[in-house]
Image (cartoon, rainbow, N blue to C red):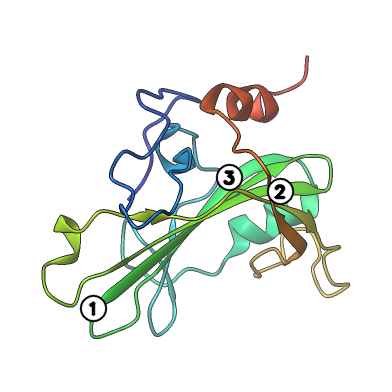
Amino acid sequence: MLLPLGLVACDGEINEDAPPNGVPAHVDLFACGVQLTCPAYCIHLSIADCSSGGPETLGCAGELWLEGGSGALEVHDRPGPGNWMGDKLTLFLGDGKALVQNRTRSCLDAPCETIPWELGAHELCDVATPPATCQPDNCSELPVLENCAPLESDWSCGEVATAMSPMP
C-alpha cells in the first residue's frame, strides 16, 4: 500500500480500533500521510516492490541510507500462508535518528483485510553507519537501525510533519 502524496493529511491520530485488552492506543503514523521516499517493500520469500510485485534491488533504500537525510520507508512482511501480517514504517529524521512504528494483525479466523491493525509504540532508533561496501549508486541494503527504545509519549502527525519538512 502506497501512502498518498502530500506530506501530512491526518484525520484521527489515535487508533480507536485498538484492542480492548488494556493496550494503550497509539498515534497511527501510517495514517499521517507521510510521502514515502521509495516504493513500499514487500517481504515474502524475497523482497519486491509492493506496487508492481517485481523484484526490488533496494537501491532506493540504500541511497537514502547513504545520503543520511530525512525520508520514509515502509516494509510489509507477508509470510505465508497468509495468517499474519506486519508492517514497519521508518521515518529518517536526517540527524542520525529514525522514528519507527510497527503494526501487526493476525488473521486466523477471517480475511486479513477485515482485522484491525495492532499498532506498536513509537520507537526512536539510531541509524547505523552504512557498511563500506555501500557506495553511491551501489548500495542495495535496507538501512540498519540500532539502540531502538520506545518513547514515553507518541509523536503527533503535526510533529512528524515538522520533523520531515525540508529545512529552508
Q: Amino acid at mark 1?
A: Gly
Tag 2 and tag 3, C-beta contact below 8 Å: no
Kindly identify which residue carries mark 1: 82
Residue 139 found in image quarter: bottom right
Disc 2 secondary structure class: strand
What label does residue 52 carry, if any? none
Q: Position of residue 38 (x, y in %)?
A: 52, 49
Residue 51 found in image quarter: bottom left
- Residue mark closest to the camera, 3 vs 1: 1
- Seen in the picture, residue 148 relative to 28 is either above or below; the reply is below
Left or right of residue 161: residue 35: left
Q: Amino acid at mark 2?
A: Ala
Q: Earlier in the sequence, mark 1 or mark 2?
A: 1
Kindly identify which residue carries mark 3: 72
- Residue mark closest to the camera, 2 vs 3: 2
Q: CA distance from mark 3 to mark 1?
A: 26 Å
Residue 60 found in image quarter: bottom right
Q: Position of residue 33 (x, y in %)?
A: 43, 32
Left or right of residue 19: residue 26: right
Q: Position of residue 8 (x, y in %)?
A: 47, 24
Kindly identify which residue carries mark 2: 98
Q: CA distance from mark 1 to mark 2?
A: 29 Å
Residue drawn where x is 55% and y is 28% of the image: 156
Left or right of residue 85: residue 149: right
Left or right of residue 139: residue 76: left
Q: State the residue lying farthest toward the top.
A: 168
Query: How many residues crowd around disc 1 within 10 Å: few (fewer than 14), some, or many (20 or more)?
Result: few
